[in-house]
Image (cartoon, coloured by chain):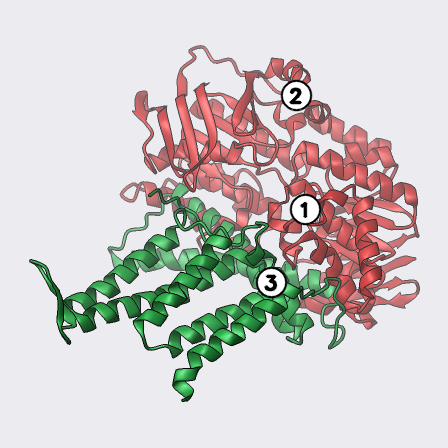
Amino acid sequence: MRFENQRIQYQYKNTIIHNLNPIVKAFWVIIISLSAFLEQGYLEETFLLLLVLLIGFVSRFPFFRTRSIRILFFTVLFLAMMQLVFNKHGEIIADLNLITIYRSGFENAVYIGARFTVIVLISFIFIYTTETNKLLYSLMKMGLPYRFGFAVITSVRLGPILGNEVDQIYYAQLSKGVKYRIFPIKKFLGTIIQFLRLLMISIIKQVDAMVISMEGRSFGLSTRRSFSREVVFSYIDYLSIFVGFVLIILFSIEKIF
Amino acid sequence: MISVRNLSFKYEGREYKTLDNINLDINLGELIVITGESGCGKTTFALALTGYLSHLYAGEYFGNICINDEKIEEKSLTEIAEEIFLVQQNPQNQFVTLTVRDEIAFGLENKEIDSLKIRARIKKALQAVYAEELIDRNIDTLSGGEKQKIAIATAIALQPKIIILDEPTSNLDIKSTNNIYKVFKRLIEQKEITLIIIDHKLNELMYFSPRILKLKQGKIIPQRSNQEFLNLSRKLRDRGRKDYKREIIKKAIQLKDVSVLRNENEVLKISSLEINKGEIVSILGNNGAGKSSFILGLMGILHSTGQKRVVLDNHILDIKRKRYPEKFGLVFQNPDHQFFCETVEDEIIFPFRNFYPSDNFNSERIINASELDDLYSELKTHPIKLSYGQKKRLGIAAVLAYHPELLFLDEIFIGQSNSDIIRIMSTLDDYRKKNNATVLIINHQPGIVHQYADRVIFFDEGRILFDVNINKAEENLIFFEKLEYLEQLHAI
């Protein structure tokens, strides 16, 4: 198994999941997360996990090339091991030399591990298959106040710019002989403050440029705005919403009755 | 169309006027080029014309600006934006959205223009800047030149009567710069828009016969003819270099099979390279060719593999990660990233103190370093209060003060006038002669830098395309069909 240093971010692919309306995908994230929390049994959680894995495979999610998946894997393994080792309720189902596994420990290990994986993985798949821009434009068109929408869009826009600024300031410090050593603490804090002060100045300048750019293009002129993008719902989107509702009803029946 | 009357402005906290009693009339369809040394008030003047100075900036504002007989000081920024649009120096910083289509649509959507009309305007604006194929691209995937085209397209889509471009080609490589001039040519020929371009590159703009205005210390100085401007710039450039003859040639840098990595990806591969002590090396290449990675890899800031050796104090040493920083001097493009202290004096001393904590700092070093400019009279000033040109020179002064043997300068001439560049190059030339130091300069100004350089290395797509003596630069640029660089070699 080969892991590459790949961050989870939107990747254009022509899959059924990528082509779903972003709002439908957001709806599915909510439905699956809600179902994971509603259900108390390990079999149902396993079913949800298989469903999410299926969605992942259909969307061609890079399970084996993402660092975050490695972190998720080891976290789940740790949580499951805690249950297997310390939960000693119910009958013994396996007696290994080092540990004895009890039924309750096994069921909880599967249940907690699956639930954790479902919630994190569906979010990863959502990020991987959804263009932030399209999601926010769809939400704004459906009533999200546009100022809020653009607050998020500009934050996403500034992310890589600030990443570059951080690199530049760090390189400038190194080239001028600044060393990041924790001791003595006072010197270390001084170095951090130097760094943050420059970063703050840089952020203010970036924001200043953006404000000029937005003001110059009449941002905030009216409480409304037009949208050049169309928000289209295909029959697959409607079908997905229907299936999502069926799923949440099925998972809620036991709770309701 | 635009009339500026007795315009003066003093920023809050500054003791001098950045704009000083400017009077000017600009007509519809005119092409104006505003030039002048860095810090002379060009960008502030652009902010004044677009109303930002009177509306958003703290300071003392006198006089007025009228567009079609209406005072902009009495109009809202949105109303002013209907008439005049500012494309800022760095397009990267002014984009609000994530894709080209959304960026051009942004201003039109704010004005609640119908979606069909928006799409038509997007298409027309992209056609005007020769960028129709970029419509569905993510902004972060665009090159510098493409970003500048999109910034201009956002302006065109809004259909203002006046567009101001603040140093539109300063962050671009030579190839992208030429593409932007093609866009200007189209806009100027249409004669529907008044274009005000703030730039130092007069040679290319002369082709369009603009009206040239020169700012000096916030004032428009008496107008010279365009030919006079050209002659003056040529005179500056042709001051001529004095050849530096080294009697014994020693190696300073030896590289063999070196790969430089960013985020574990190979961005530069060098099979073999040797650079001599005392050389000034001009490093050329388009944006993204691997020039900065070369320098950061050499310094050990970026991870690299292969054999990297430097000769320091006559000892051959393998460069390890982040080792021997005191022997290297690095000056970045953006001076604001490099100042860590409260005064100019402390800033000059700062790296020396880090590298040699137990040594006494000889005040003569400050005097020598601050000779670069009027910095000596500004020793107690906060670096942030210096002009842009002074900041650039302070960045160099702080490095020269600790006497590095290898000096790397990464696109430091961006936004500098020819006289500023010549002043810095003369200082660097003197420094290498006194210290037998090696100076590597990444630049897009070969016309001036090659007056002083001994050698040129051209990077292309993460490889060295050619590495030759300066006398062979021209024929290699022809051989490898880098004709846009050839034009720049003869430019002012």
Instruction: Please determine if labels 1 and 2 lie on a single subunit.
Output: yes
Q: Along the line of sight, which residue is nearer the eye, B13 or B164? A: B164
10 Å crowding of disc 2: few (<14), some (14-19), many (20+): few
For disc 2, the marked residue is B240
For disc 3, the marked residue is A154
The answer for how far apart the CA atoms under marks 3 and 2 are is: 49 Å
As drawn, the chain in red is B
Q: Which three-letter amino acid code belongs to the residue tagged 3? A: Thr
Q: Nearer the viewer, mark 1 or mark 2?
A: 1
Q: Which three-letter amino acid code belongs to the residue tagged 2? A: Gly
Is A106 rendered above or below residue B467? below
Q: Residue at x 66, y 16 (%)?
A: B474
Q: Position of residue B74 (x, y in %)?
A: 82, 72
Of the 4 image quadrants, the one containing the C terminus of chain B is top right
Q: Position of residue B292 (x, y in %)?
A: 51, 35
User: Image quadrant of residue B252?
Assistant: top left
